[in-house]
Every structure is written in structure tokens, then in C-alpha cells.
């Protein structure tokens, strides 16, 4: 069975000092702790949503994955892709994954990235607004298709607005510590969701 990751530099591991400390690898180890699936990371630094649709998705479909994780949109936020164009391509990716595979699909919202050293006012507020708009599209898609959603934006935003050792030297991509924090916060969030569901069921 195959565990496939689709996306950009955040899953590709830019900012991490090794593959073992990258977000993609840490997330895979958390979601598949027994190592039952083979990791195939198709994420490419600099990718936008259309790159996933045109270049990464065809390979993913060939692999007949058991699990797929998608994190894309950061570069679209920064290059000014229209919301409608983003939604069109994102929807096509999800439609193909749900119709052509039986994989468990996990969508991850776009995190806020950029320390106060490089994202100065009013640019920081603009980027934050665009990120939230794109994330509404991702959340809508998760709800429509009943897919698992990891809301990385709300889990991590407050911790990533200031310069700190959570950033790698470029002050944009997370450091090893930053990626580890992401996964720790995701673990806490999913555990609390599981607890809530078990309480609701009883």
C-alpha cells in the first residue's frame, strides 16, 4: 500500500535539515506509525495548485494509493492566483482522487507563514486575508466530500507571526523545530477530536 503526499515546499521539506526532520516525513510517521504503507512524496518546492493537478496527480493515480495527503496553496497566495481559478483546480484534484481511488484523503489548510522580519505591514495583513480566503475553499471541499481536514492555519498561526527559532534561516519556511511543532499540534488536535467523538457517541 502507498501513502502519497501532494503539494509544495512545505511537504517537500524545505527548511528542514534532513528528510527525517521534514514535515512530510514526520506527518507520515504519525499517520502510519506501524509503517504499513510506503511513502511516496510527490511534493515539489514552488508548486502551485495547477502543478499538482497536471504533474503530481497523474503519478499519484498510477500508484493506486491507500492514503493521500494534500497541502497546496501557499505559492498561489503569493503569486495572485484568483480564488475562482484556485477552487477550479483544487476541486478537479479532489474529484479525481475520490472517483479514481479508494484512498483515505486528508486535506491540510494553508498555514500562515512569514516572520515579522520579512512580512511587513500592510503586506502581512493582505497575505493573512488571502490565506483565509483560500482556506475557506479547502474547508468547503472537505465538507462537501466528507474528507478529513487538518486545520494547520488555526493550529499554528499565532506562533508563526513573529521571528523565532520556529523559522529556518529564510524566515519563511519552518525549521526542524517548527515542523516538529506542527506535527505535535496536529496530534493534539486529532486526539481531542477523537475524544470528542467518543464522548458524543456515548
Image (cartoon, rainbow, N blue to C red):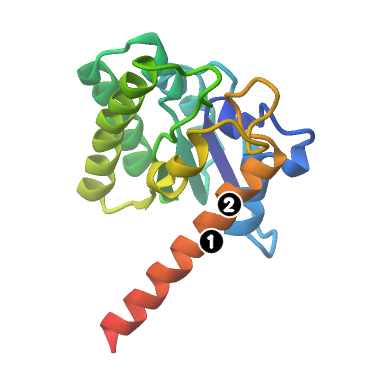
Q: Is residue 200 left or right of residue 103?
A: left
Give x and y (percent) for residue 42: 59, 29
**In terms of depth relative to the viewer, which is nearer, 131 or 157?**
157
The spot of residue 130 in percent (x, y) is 30, 23
Vertical comparison of 161 with 118: above or below: below
Q: Residue furthest bottom?
A: 202
Determine the residue positioned at 51% across, 50% down.
67
Mark 1: few, some, or many residues within 10 Å (few <14, many ≥20)?
A: some
Residue positioned most to the top: 79
Q: Please name whichever residue, 115 or 144, is drawn nearer the observer in this view of the structure.
A: 115
Q: Residue at x 50, y 64 (%)?
A: 188
The secondary element bearing badge 1 is classed as helix
Question: For mark 2, does the 10 Å Cα neighbourhood hold few (<14), some (14 to 19), or many (20 or more) residues?
Answer: some
- Circle 1 residue: 187
Residue 102 location in percent, x, y? 41, 51
Residue 101 in sight: no
Q: Quick check: marks 2 and 1 in contact, CB under 8 Å?
A: yes
Residue 183 - label? 2
Judged from the image, the secondary structure of the residue bearing numbered disc 2 is: helix
Determine if residue 11 is in view.
yes
Residue at x-position 51% and y-position 37%:
160
Q: Tell me what residue is drawn at x 68 percent, y 37 percent.
A: 165
| Residue 94, quarter of picture | top left
- 190 over 157 or under it: above or below: below
182 above or below 47? below
Q: CA distance from mark 2 to mark 1?
A: 6 Å
- The reply, left or right, for residue 37 in relation to residue 125 is right
What is the total number of numbered labels drawn onto the structure image? 2
Location of residue 13 (image quadrant): top right
User: Residue 65 bears which disc, if any?
Assistant: none
Q: Quadrant of the image for the C terminus?
A: bottom left
Amino acid at each position: 500500500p502507498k501513502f502519497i503526499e501532494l503539494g509544495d515546499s512545505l511537504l517537500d521539506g524545505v527548511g528542514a535539515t534532513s528528510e527525517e526532520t521534514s514535515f512530510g516525513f514526520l506527518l507520515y510517521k504519525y499517520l502510519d506509525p506501524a509503517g504499513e504503507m510506503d511513502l511516496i512524496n510527490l511534493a515539489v518546492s514552488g508548486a502551485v495548485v495547477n502543478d499538482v493537478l497536471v504533474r503530481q496527480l497523474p503519478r499519484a493515480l498510477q500508484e493506486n494509493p491507500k492514503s493521500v495527503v494534500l497541502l497546496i496553496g501557499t505559492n498561489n497566495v503569493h503569486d495572485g492566483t484568483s480564488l475562482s481559478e484556485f477552487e477550479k483546480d483544487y476541486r478537479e484534484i479532489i474529484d479525481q482522487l475520490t472517483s479514481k481511488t479508494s484512498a483515505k484523503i486528508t486535506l491540510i489548510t494553508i498555514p500562515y507563514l512569514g516572520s515579522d522580519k520579512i512580512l511587513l505591514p500592510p503586506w502581512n495583513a493582505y497575505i493573512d486575508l488571502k490565506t483565509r480566503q483560500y482556506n475557506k475553499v479547502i474547508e468547503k471541499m472537505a465538507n462537501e466530500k466528507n474528507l478529513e481536514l487538518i486545520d494547520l492555519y488555526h493550529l499554528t498561526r499565532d506562533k508563526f507571526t513573529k521571528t523565532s527559532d520556529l523559522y529556518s534561516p529564510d524566515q519563511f519556511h519552518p525549521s526542524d523545530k517548527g515542523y516538529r511543532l506542527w506535527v505535535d499540534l496536529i496530534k493534539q488536535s486529532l486526539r481531542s477530536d477523537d475524544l470528542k467523538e467518543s464522548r458524543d457517541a456515548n
